[in-house]
Image (cartoon, helix red, strand yellow):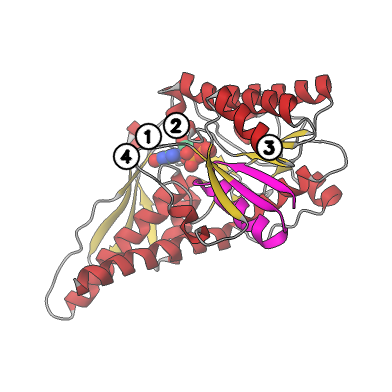
Amino acid sequence: MKKVIVTGVTGQDGSNMVDYLLRETDHMIIGGVRRLSVKNHQNIEHLQDEDRFFLIDLDVTDAQNTDEVIAEHKPDYFINFAANSFVGCSWDMPEQVFETNTLGVLRCLESIKKFQPNCRFYSAGSSEEFGNVDYSPQDINHPIKPRSPYGASKAAARHLVKVYCESYNMFAVHGILFNHEGTKRGEEFVTRKITKGVARIHSVVHDVDNWRKRKSEKPKFEPIELGNIDSKRDWSDSEDFVQGVWLMLNQDTPRNYVLASGETHSIREFVEKAFKHAGFKGFWEGEGIDEKYYSLDGEHKNLLVRINPEFYRPAEVDLLLGNSIPIREELGWRPKSSFDKLVQKMVEFDINAENSIKGREGTS
Ligand code: GDP
């Protein structure tokens, strides 16, 4: 039985990758997790009774630990999703970001080279490496021009992967993944922040609608606060991307590919679509930091979104739009989702989660 080590399994991509591999292969899957004082195993709870999945302690910031794991388990594949993945915090902790995202990759490559040189390695690259883009859509040959410590950390990892492939004839790929989201996405990312906020507001307004049948009441809730709503991203569903990662790892010779939807949308459009899926008819008023998004509630305006400059970044990536034609044509990658389906799925999931919390509170 082949063995696949997946790091970062408590995160969105790691957990989706494990689900995919259990469904599509008969390999043994070994999940690498970092020791934390409080466990965050929510995304892998459903795997508890899986015969072909088990967890090990693996921290890519520790070379001894990485060496021991590779030497003991001798994996056929190593998929590294262990990373500090939030661009926004990379200005606050740039060293930690490089320690994990760049040196972490270096340690994995070194351990594989020493103990299991035929192991196929996947490094999680990012469209943030393109940063201040020269042209659209961005393909694999786009210049590397990061705008954040996060983007720089991933760009450096890309160079290391290339160097190890060329120097030691290793099989290592660094996929360039554009933004990818879903119901396991962390709440610090703008998509999940919006869909969670929409669900929270929906639950209050929905409650008030019921109340109104008995007495007049205006809904009370805090609006969602966002930073730059005019940046544009190429968003896909993480569940589609894990297939692309696996295809990249199973090519005859290692070659990097871009995974992207090929569509770009602003944060503003994401806000509009998310509220629409929750049944709100919204409209914008004002400009710049005074811009606000409202819905009409009889005579009253309900404030749904306002701008908080605290969420602006020191340097912004204004536009991302990926060209994933090569992986579609050469490796047969077939994404199933779309921007609309993705927003709908996330909003519905978060509304259902709010409703079940409310249901539990109601019965307790
Ligand atoms: P990123 O593309 O990997 O940085 O993904 P994010 O979801 O963190 O951010 C996507 C875009 O949304 C960036 O251009 C952010 O500046 C913008 N944005 C606007 N408001 C917010 C916010 O409140 N939180 C986050 N995370 N991003 C925001």
Q: Say if mark 3 contacts mark 2, CB within 8 Å.
A: no
What x and y, as percent, mark residue 310?
A: 33, 32
What x and y, as percent, mark residue 202?
A: 32, 64
Q: Amino acid at mark 3?
A: Ile
Element under label 4?
helix
According to the picture, the residue beneath numbered tag 3 turns out to be 176
Q: Amino acid at mark 2?
A: Gly
According to the picture, the residue beneath numbered tag 2 turns out to be 88
- Closer mark to the observer between disc 1 and disc 2: 2
- Closer mark to the observer between disc 2 and disc 4: 2
| Ligand 1 closer than 8 Å to label 2 CB | yes
| Ligand 1 closer than 8 Å to label 1 CB | yes
309 sits left or right of 192 in the view: left
Q: Which residues are magenta?
A: 1-30
| Residue visible at 28% across and 51% down in the picture | 223
**Disc on the earlier residue, 1 or 2:** 2
Distance (Cα) linking label 1 and label 3: 25 Å
| Local crowd size for mark 4, using a 10 Å CA cut-off: few (<14), some (14–19), many (≥20) | few
According to the picture, the residue beneath numbered tag 1 turns out to be 311
Quarter in which the C terminus is drawn: bottom left
What x and y, as percent, mark residue 292?
A: 33, 47
According to the picture, the residue beneath numbered tag 4 turns out to be 290
Q: Quadrant of residue 199?
A: bottom left
- Closer mark to the observer between disc 1 and disc 4: 1
| Residue visible at 55% across and 59% down in the picture | 342
| Residue visible at 87% across and 37% down in the picture | 253
| Residue 158 magenta | no
- Closer mark to the observer between disc 3 and disc 4: 3
